């Protein structure tokens, strides 16, 4: 068992102080047993628990999140022992019980990760697209929201996997430094115990161990760089999740049709060729400058639909009908999807969808 002083000594290298112990005991409702003198007695499970709490806080988790992923030690219902009675005046000195020193911490079982909650949109069936009008736009908007939520769930799953990998790397790094300290201690003990003839052999062993130490330091540096890369990747995933949240929130924002009017530079990337019965050379990238002069019709949330029909001057039999479904993100940006349908002599022969971003043209 550990007293407060011995527990703090064991946790010193983790930068854990007594106020941290008191705060965690209160927030996690830990019941620490006491001895007959009212002194707290920490078990190795408690010491290891405090190490894990410090690790999760370093990863940016809150106390509420830590409560859900750690294993709290069992509550010990032992009552404090009564203080010994005042000894009679006899020449016998009672030894005061001293705390046990050098107790090693027991590694706790790995915490179970919180199950990922699936998006409520995951079970909604994909509705078939209906050609023309607001019905087609509504179906495409629902498909867009479902796709955005699926991408968000995948990114969140990757984030949990990388955080789990960071935890394993942290444990491996701690074990590595522990082994290095043990090897250094063994060398020191051997130098003190063996005779002069064996010292030459120890010097050879020391050189070999020193080389291993250099290799291990290089490996440690590589691990640290890998941890840093994982943190940067986590930050990138968080930014992507935030962008997806902003896009989803924009679909439900107040609608102002006048904000859509003006000159826009459209950049489109081909997402899917829905059908092509004529072998048309459908472009994969498209850039154009267009103007929205009339207030568009609201589709859903802050999303509008703009239908445009183009007649080819070189061949009157051909025309192209485009349905632009975009949401207003800010004063300079529109984002959404474009569906282009090619019609030959009144018969649709090809159809393709693009993901577009429109920037306001000065």
Image (cartoon, rainbow, N blue to C red):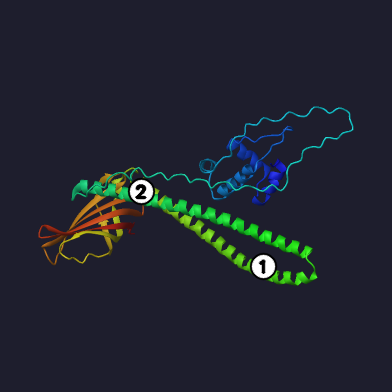
Q: In which quarter of the image is residue 70?
A: top right
Residue at (65, 39) in percent of width and height: 22
Crowd around label 1: few <14 · some 14–19 · many ≥20 (10 Å)? some
Does 86 sit left or right of 242 as displayed? right
- The N terminus lies in which quarter of the figure? top right
Up/down of 106 relative to 351, above or below: above
**Residue 346 x %, y %:** 10, 57
- The residue nearer to you, when weighing 7 against 187, is 187
- The residue identified by callout 2 is 149
Q: Earlier in the sequence, mark 2 or mark 1?
A: 2
Residue 252 shown left or right of residue 42 in the figure: left
Q: Name the one closer to the observer, 8 or 335.
A: 8
Q: Where is residue 281 in the image (x, y as percent from the top left)?
A: 21, 67
Q: In this view, does 4 lie to the left or right of 320?
A: right
Element carrying mark 1: helix
Residue 64: percent from the left, percent from the top? 52, 40
x then y, percent, for residue 54? 60, 47
Q: Residue at x 51, y 41 (%)?
A: 68
In depth, the one of 72 and 262 nearer the eye is: 72
Q: Is residue 293 above or below residue 100?
A: below
Instruction: Find the distance from the CA under tag 2 to the CA under tag 1.
Output: 53 Å
User: Would you say 66 lies left or right of 81 here?
Assistant: left
Image quadrant containing the C terminus: bottom left
Residue 337 falls in which quadrant of the image?
bottom left
Look at the picture and state if 102 lies above or below 89: below
User: Which residue is drawn at the image coordinates 59% and 66% (left, top)?
Assistant: 218
Q: Nearer the viewer, mark 2 or mark 1?
A: 1
Q: Decide: marks 2, 1 in contact (CB < 8 A)?
A: no
Q: Name the residue under label 1.
A: 209
Residue 295 in sight? no
Q: Residue at x 38, y 45 (%)?
A: 118
């Amino acid at each position: 068992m550990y007293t407060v002083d011995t527990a703090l000594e064991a946790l010193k290298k983790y930068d854990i102080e007594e106020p941290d112990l008191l705060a965690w005991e209160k927030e996690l409702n830990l019941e620490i047993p006491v001895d007959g003198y009212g002194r707290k007695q920490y078990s190795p499970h408690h010491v290891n628990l405090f190490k894990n709490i410090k690790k999760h806080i370093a990863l940016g988790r809150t106390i509420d999140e830590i409560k859900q992923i750690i294993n709290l030690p069992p509550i010990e219902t032992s009552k404090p022992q009564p203080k010994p009675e005042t000894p009679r005046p006899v020449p016998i000195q009672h030894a005061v019980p001293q705390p046990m020193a050098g107790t090693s911490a027991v590694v706790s079982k790995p915490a179970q990760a919180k199950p990922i909650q699936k998006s409520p949109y995951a079970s909604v069936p994909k509705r078939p697209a209906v050609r023309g009008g607001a019905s087609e736009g509504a179906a495409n908007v629902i498909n867009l929201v479902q796709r955005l939520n699926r991408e968000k769930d995948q990114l969140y799953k990757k984030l949990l996997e990388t955080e789990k990998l960071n935890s394993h790397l942290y444990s491996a790094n701690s074990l590595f430094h522990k082994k290095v300290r043990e090897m250094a201690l063994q060398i020191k003990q051997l130098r003190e115990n063996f005779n002069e003839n064996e010292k030459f052999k120890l010097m050879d062993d020391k050189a070999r161990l020193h080389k291993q130490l250099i290799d291990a330091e290089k490996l440690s540096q590589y691990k640290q760089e890998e941890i840093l890369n994982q943190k940067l990747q986590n930050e990138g995933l968080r930014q992507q999740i935030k962008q997806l949240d902003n896009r989803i929130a924009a679909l439900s924002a107040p609608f102002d049709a006048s904000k859509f009017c003006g000159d826009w530079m459209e950049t489109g990337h081909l997402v899917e060729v829905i059908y092509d019965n004529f072998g048309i050379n459908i472009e994969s990238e498209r850039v154009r400058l267009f103007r929205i002069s009339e207030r568009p019709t609201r589709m859903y949330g802050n999303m509008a639909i703009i239908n445009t029909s183009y007649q080819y001057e070189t061949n009157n039999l051909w025309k192209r009908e485009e349905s632009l479904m975009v949401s207003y993100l800010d004063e300079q940006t529109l984002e959404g999807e474009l569906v282009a349908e090619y019609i030959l002599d009144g018969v649709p022969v090809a159809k393709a969808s693009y993901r577009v971003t429109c920037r306001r043209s000065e």
